[in-house]
Amino acid sequence: MRDTLVLNASFEPLSTVTLNRAVVLVLQDKAVVEQEHPGLRMRAAAVDMPVPRVIRLCRYVRVPFRRHAPWSRRGVLVRDQHRCAYCGNRATTVDHVVPRAQGGGDEWMNTVASCAADNHRKADRTPEQAGMPLLHLPFVPTPADAMLLAMKAADRPNLPGPSAEPPSGQAA
């Protein structure tokens, strides 16, 4: 099911909601459609409206300030665009740069997306110890970055499998 980005009345990104929830907010006049999916419409007996991709709330919602997005395995995969940090192929697991056995934790700066083969090959060693340099460095996404990356991931077609070439333009 498609997710819809929800903007505050001030156009700040707040969250993503399901398509059904977005339609309910629009039909209850609590939100307006800012961007729609091209060529898609929702039709019912008394309703004909575009399928919302981005909606904006009509009233401002005060949100407590959060400096960093909360860490999650899914968040790491989305941040790294499901690409292995060691070989560039499709990533299905999360690897700790400093292994947990050596005191590394579940943190944005200590985790990268990895394919299962490279995760197994690296084992309980650092990238330097294993001779496996990172193609890209981990970073801490802001909550807005995390949300926008998640929206892009939902729109992206399926990534090719391990036999595909790594994406060009990624350097160590």
Image (cartoon, rainbow, N blue to C red):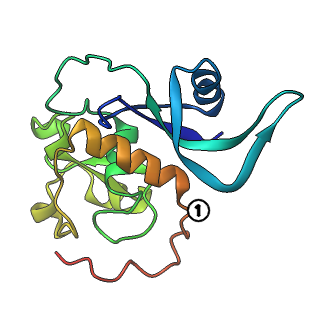
Q: Quadrant of residue 43?
A: top right
Q: Mark 1: few, some, or many residues within 10 Å (few <14, many ≥20)? A: few
In the picture, the quarter occupied by the N terminus is top right
In the picture, the quarter occupied by the C terminus is bottom left
Residue bearing the label numbered 1: 158
Is residue 113 visible in the rendered image? The answer is yes
Residue at horizontal 89%, vertical 28%? 45
x, y (%) of residue 145?
27, 46
Left-right relation of 166 to 12: right
x, y (%) of residue 44?
85, 31
Question: In this view, which residue lies farthest toward the right?
Answer: 45
Residue type indicated by callout 1: Asn
Give 111 or 116, whichever is nearer the viewer: 111
Give 148 or 113, whichever is nearer the viewer: 148
x, y (%) of residue 29?
57, 21
Residue at horizontal 57%, vertical 22%? 25
x, y (%) of residue 113?
33, 53
Is residue 77 visible in the rendered image? The answer is no
In the image, residue 172 sits, relative to residue 114, either above or below, namely below
Give 121 or 74, whichever is nearer the viewer: 74
Residue at horizontal 43%, vertical 56%? 116
In the image, residue 7 sits, relative to residue 65, either above or below, namely below
Q: Quadrant of residue 117?
A: bottom left
Left-right relation of 31 to 110: right
Q: Secondary structure at mark 1?
A: loop
Give 120 or 3, whichever is nearer the viewer: 3
